[in-house]
Image (tube, helix red, strand yellow):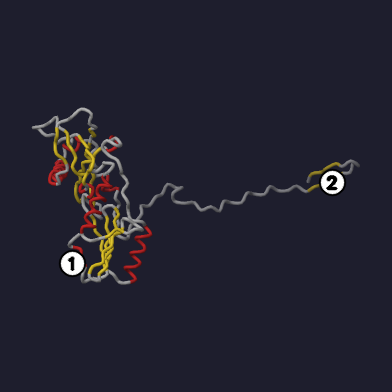
Amino acid sequence: MSSLSGATGSSVHVPAVAPVAAPASTRPHTRIQSGISKPKVYTDGTIRYGLFAIAESEPQSLEAALRDPNWQQAMHDEYMALMRNKTWHLVPPSAGRNIIDCKWVYKIKRKSDGSIDRYKARLVAKGFKQCYDIDYEDTFSPVVKAATIRLILSLAVSNSWSLHQLDVKNVFLHGLLEEEVFMRQPPGYESKDRPGYVCKLDKALYGLKQAPRAWYSRLSAKQQQLGFKPSKADVSLFYLNKGGITMFLLIYVDDIIVAISSFEATATLLKDL
């Protein structure tokens, strides 16, 4: 008991209050706080990709790639594909020309279970060294609008049309160049007979600023030769009416969706694409 003295001299006794204990924390104690961890168990057949990614990775230089026979074969296959496609021809260098460089890009293609499918080497031009109005002009390439895709898919589903998906391999290598583009010879594949020559590109190459536009221009011209007409609402939508059969083509770079109103005519019309 404690007492307080007032102004009149009388004292008032106040009972002592016992300290109130702080409430115990109700927050649960997790296993992570105790340093206990349990690896996640996948029940859908998924395999952790990191286990395979650590085992082997892409080389970071040409010298490292040349020490591996797998990457040597991948580079050889890519180079021979470019030669068969007649992507360039060698010309003597000339003063005043803008000559761009190129490099090899390496990628390991894996299967769904994470194992190695194949080794992919791609020759890429250093398009950032191109000069506007000298070796390129327009670079814009249209792609189909999302609203157009939804419209055609809903139309095909509502009328039970046939739907197909096409994918073009090495799509940019098919584009024809209108400008004069000069590039140094690929590293590791310089010509022994003409080591000082440069490559004059006849067809587009990955990395060029105008490569997407060159591909679209060639594809659009070919489709119109086959009788397709571009839509006025979306230039990446082509349609064809032939013998009472309607066919739509949706173009998104190298991915093509085909919608045909007749299942029987599918094989006949697709073989011309």
Q: Residue at x 44, y 49 (%)?
A: 32
Task: Residue 93: name its quadrant.
Answer: top left
Dot 1 falls on a residue whose secondary structure is helix
> Looking at the image, can residue 63 be seen?
no
Question: Is 152 on the left or on the right of 169, as rendered?
Answer: right
Kindly indicate the quadrant of the structure image that contains residue 197. Answer: top left
- Quadrant for the C terminus in the image: bottom left
Q: Is residue 220 above or below residue 151?
A: above
How far apart are labels 2 and 1 at the CA level?
109 Å
Q: Count neighbours of disc 2 (C-alpha within 10 A) and say few if under 14, some if 14 to 19, many if 20 or more.
A: few
| Image coords of residue 47 (percent x, y) | 29, 54
Q: How many marks?
A: 2
Work out whether 251 lies above or below 69: below
Give the vertical position of 123 relative to 142 (above or below). above
- Depth check, front residue: 196 or 179: 179
Amino acid type for the residue under numbered disc 1: Thr
